[in-house]
Image (spheres, grey):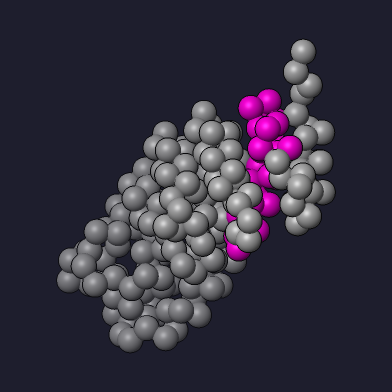
Amino acid sequence: MDGELRTLTERLRRESDGTAGGSAAGAEGGVAGGPVAFERLVATDDHDELAAVLTAAGQPLWARELAAFRLGLAGDRRAFEALVLLLNHRDPPRCASAAHALARLGDPRTARAAAALATNELRVAYALQPVRLLAELRAPESVPALITTLERRLRPHDPYRRVALACVEGLGALGDVRARPVLNGALAHPALAEAAVGALARIPQQR
């Protein structure tokens, strides 16, 4: 079993234990709440059944997350919208699981969605996983979005240091010369300086 799937399964099993009801199927083709429904979603290999959970009314969040995650790992693009919503969730474990699934989904829309979330200043508190996902995707949108996000984090007294650090590390991993100016700017920030030195060392010297 995928390690992240194992972690997610354990977390969502605990959530499902607190969900009222235990029947196996809902009125609109999805699943009802409870441990019986949870075990069904874990065991099924029917992608249509999993996809139905994403569109049926009244499904608990854990069920939608489990269905979307499993579809994402399988490369089924019907999971895309649900995973993007979870990528920007207030609960960090949901964001991390969504990022893991999106990185494996193979949907060409993923990088654009991650860039929009990473650069949305109204949601910057939840930008950590979109930033990390952009670095993993290595898409054309990745470097410009990480540069933009990091530039904003270099303002005085910015509280989102984890997001800034993820940008620095991501830009170092991507090794694009366009990141040099913003990484040089990060050197002036004690919380980022060490990571910025390492990132700059990974970027080829311009000739």
Taking the magenta stretch, the answer to whether it contains residue 91 is: no
Whether 174 is drawn above or below 76: the answer is above
Residue at (47, 42) in percent of width and height: 115
Q: x, y percentage for residue 75?
A: 44, 42
Residue at (77, 44) in percent of width and height: 187
The magenta segment is: 159-184
The quarter of the image holding the N terminus is bottom right
Q: x, y percentage for residue 150?
A: 60, 45
* Front-most of residues 159 and 27: 159
Residue 57 visible, this orientation: yes
The quarter of the image holding the C terminus is top right
- Name the residue at the front extreme: 156
Q: x, y percentage for residue 8?
A: 54, 66
* Front-most of residues 54 and 130: 130
In the rendered structure, the answer to whether residue 143 lies left or right of residue 24 reads right
In the rendered structure, the answer to whether residue 86 lies left or right of residue 164 reads left
